[in-house]
Image: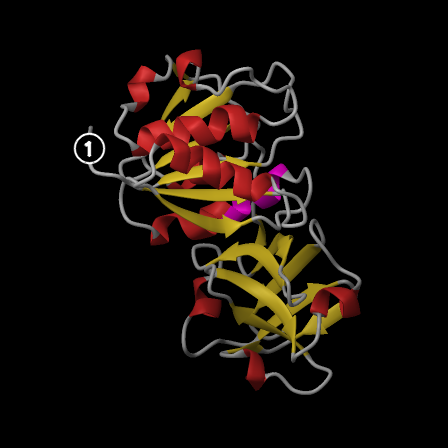
Amino acid sequence: MSASRIVTFTTDFGLNDPFVGILHGVVLNIHRETTVVDVCHAVASYDVFDGGWTIAQAYRFFPPRTVHVVVVDPGVGSTRRPIIVETDDYIFVAPDNGVLSLIEARESKVAVRHITAERYFLQPVSHTFHGRDIFAPVAAWLSKGVAPSEFGPEISDYVRLPLPQVERIAENSLRGVVLKVDKFGNLITNISQQDAPALFGSAVPPVTILISGQTITRVCQSYTDGGEDEFFAIVGSSGFLEIAARQSPAAEKLTAGVGTPIGIILGEL
């Protein structure tokens, strides 16, 4: 067996029930030398894309060979498969419901396996808590050094979520969408530097941003640069363009949320 690894958890379990502690206990009972880290347990309930977004922002900041467990699993107890996804540097354990689609889109190489080796599960397996009985013990055995190939066959027909794409309307205009509303009410869009490089530099050209009937013309460098009662754009730490308001929730003020369209016109109107 190899040296112990880190196991992380990303779930929609919240913190009001014992579920998170149980996950930790399962891992440590199998391999007590494992370091267990909670990425987030406040993923929106049943929201597979939100879970995928969360782990996609966090996974690469951990040491290589970290095992990331993602349990946002509205299909628990059904015929959906448990899977292992292996990249060059990381291993993921999750339900086969598309929650790792953003990882697949970002990584140049992935190998996906259907977890079929029931000898690594806790028995009996509950119909409602596969996080405890399948995903956590599999992660623990991976941490202990068991190779991913021991858990089941490689597959290619795993579930992929349709990811929102930025639409190019004209040479100087494009249309995107809000992907995420963070805890502060900032609207994180799917517009990246690849889509609009001019907005991500130090000298931003004139721009018009249209969202929820509002017109925004400023891209700020920090949240404190925005004026009182002003909506502005900012490049967030996730690498995507955000719409924000100074120390107040832009999402609430704009009555906007996940799926809200956003239009961008570069240059003078």
Numbered range of the magenta stretch: 48-54
> Measured along the vertical axis of the image, is residue 158 above or below residue 4?
above
Label 1 amino acid? Ser
Display colour scheme: secondary structure
Q: Nearer the viewer, residue 162 or 101?
A: 101
150 sits left or right of 121 in the view: left
Residue 86: in sight, yes or no? Answer: no
Q: Secondary structure at mark 1?
A: loop
> Measured along the vertical axis of the image, is residue 71 above or below residue 258?
above
Residue bearing the label numbered 1: 2
Residue 74: x percent and y percent? 67, 30
Quadrant that contains the C terminus: bottom right
Q: Counting other residues with Cα less than 10 Å from the Cα at mark 1, is it few (<14), some (14-19), or many (20 or more)? A: few
Residue 5: x percent and y percent? 29, 41
Q: Nearer the viewer, residue 266 or 232?
A: 232
Residue 145: x percent and y percent? 25, 29
Quarter assignment of residue 139 = top left
Residue 218: in sight, yes or no? Answer: yes
Residue at x-position 53% and y-position 18%: 81
- Number of numbered tags placed on the structure image: 1
31 sits left or right of 199 in the view: left
Residue at x-position 69% and y-position 51%: 258
Residue at x-position 55% and y-position 15%: 124
Residue 106: x percent and y percent? 40, 42
Residue at x-position 62% and y-position 60%: 182
Most distant residue in the left direction? 2
Q: Does residue 247 belong to the magenta stretch?
A: no
Quarter assignment of residue 138 = top left
